[in-house]
Amino acid sequence: MMTEPTHVDGNAAAGAFAEVLGFDVTTAMLTCGKCCHATAFAESHVYNRGPGIVVRCPACDDVLARLVQTSTDMWLDFRGAQSWRIAIPDR
């Protein structure tokens, strides 16, 4: 019997976060506030079956970020990430 995976990688949520933040988040480095593991957004674990998107640390499974969209608002919660490091593109 084959079971469906419970999560997908960060690439699955990159479009939704980029739409709100205005840049490609796949290469952003997120540092977990719990275990201090640094990982690229694309390598994070994403759970998107609920009413919003939950981004979790691949090392300890703690929540790094949440994104929920309603008909009138967009809710962003970054409190689980100690930091986001975003490379500045060449000009």
Image (spheres, rainbow, N blue to C red):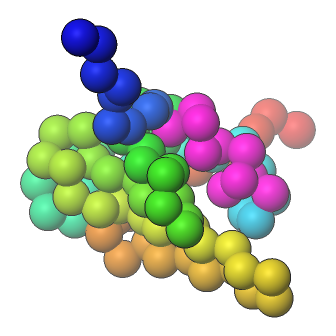
Residue 89 found in image quarter: top right
Q: How far from the left and from the top, in percent, is residue 58? A: 25, 38
- Which residue in the rendered view is the most extreme toward the top? 1
11 is within the stretch colored magenta: yes
Q: Mark yes or no: residue 4 visible.
A: yes
Residue 13 found in image quarter: top right
Q: Residue at x 38, y 37 (%)?
A: 7
- Which residue in the rendered view is the most extreme toward the right? 91
The reply, left or right, for residue 50 in relation to residue 17 is: left
Q: How far from the left and from the top, in percent, is residue 80? A: 31, 69
For the residue pair 49 and 37, the one nearer the viewer reads as 49
Quadrant of image for the N terminus: top left
Q: Residue at x 13, y 47 (%)?
A: 60
For the stretch drawn in magenta, what is the main secondary structure? Answer: helix
Q: Residue at x 81, y 88 (%)?
A: 72
For the residue pair 11 and 79, the one nearer the viewer reads as 11
Instruction: Give the magenta-colored segment's residue range.
Output: 10-19
Q: Residue at x 50, y 38 (%)?
A: 10
Q: How many numbered marks, from 0 up?
A: 0
